[in-house]
Image: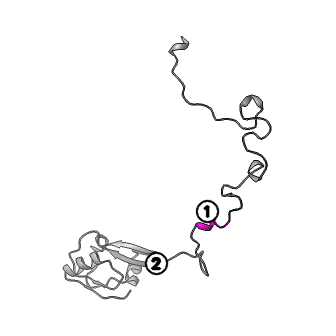
């Protein structure tokens, strides 16, 4: 093996601060300037000195008031029209009937979305998307608004 045939290594190792004079960053201040909080010990990542008014934390939006730690809204369980293809035509599609059929769990809210096709005329009494409503009415069904 010849030293000239070895590949060139272009990566340079990081300077190890405060590991003696021979390291290139050793002795006295070790590249941290002189005095002050940043020259000593551990510091939080968010430290910006004394500039409180312009600090990053002050610039971030803050949810104020009561209930700021609660979730923002109720999540609805999406149900596509393709799932309702086998739904009996005489039974209206309501949240209670969907719970009885075992499609959703008790206490969940639902929204019917328009993915898939439907051939039956269904009566829908649940929140429904615009696209799904058009498909249901095109198949001869009707939508009764209730939330």
Instruction: Give the vertical position of 45 relative to 114 (above or below).
Output: above
| Label located before the other in sequence (1 or 2) | 1
Residue 123 figure quarter? bottom left
Residue lying at the far top in this picture: please name it.
Answer: 2
112 vs 142, left or right, is: right
68 vs 76, left or right, is: right
The residue under the point 29% across, 78% down is: 130
- Give SS at disc 2: loop
- Give SS at disc 1: helix
Instruction: Give the vertical position of 100 relative to 37 (above or below).
Output: below
Q: Marks 2 and 1: in contact by CB < 8 Å?
A: no
55 vs 80, left or right, is: right
Picture coordinates of residue 46, whole percent (x, y): 66, 58
- The residue that mark 2 highlights is 108
The residue under the point 19% across, 79% down is: 138
- The residue that mark 1 highlights is 56
The colour mode here is one colour
Q: Assign the N terminus to one quadrant of the image.
A: top right
The residue under the point 23% across, 74% down is: 118
Characterize the magenta stretch by its predominant secondary structure: loop
- The magenta stretch is 49-59
Residue 102 figure quarter? bottom left
């Amino acid at each position: 093996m010849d030293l000239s045939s070895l590949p060139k290594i272009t990566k340079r190792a990081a300077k190890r601060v405060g590991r003696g004079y021979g390291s290139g960053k050793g002795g006295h201040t070790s590249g941290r300037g002189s005095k002050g909080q940043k020259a000593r010990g551990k510091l939080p990542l968010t430290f910006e000195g004394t500039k409180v008014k312009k600090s990053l934390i002050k610039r971030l939006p803050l949810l104020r008031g009561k209930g700021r730690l609660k979730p923002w809204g109720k999540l609805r369980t999406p149900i596509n029209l393709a799932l309702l293809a086998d739904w009996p035509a005489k039974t209206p599609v309501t949240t209670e009937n969907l719970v009885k059929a075992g499609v959703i769990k008790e206490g969940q809210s639902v929204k019917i979305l328009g993915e898939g096709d439907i051939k039956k005329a269904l009566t829908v009494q649940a929140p429904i998307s615009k696209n799904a409503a058009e498909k249901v009415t095109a198949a001869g069904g009707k939508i009764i608004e209730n939330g």
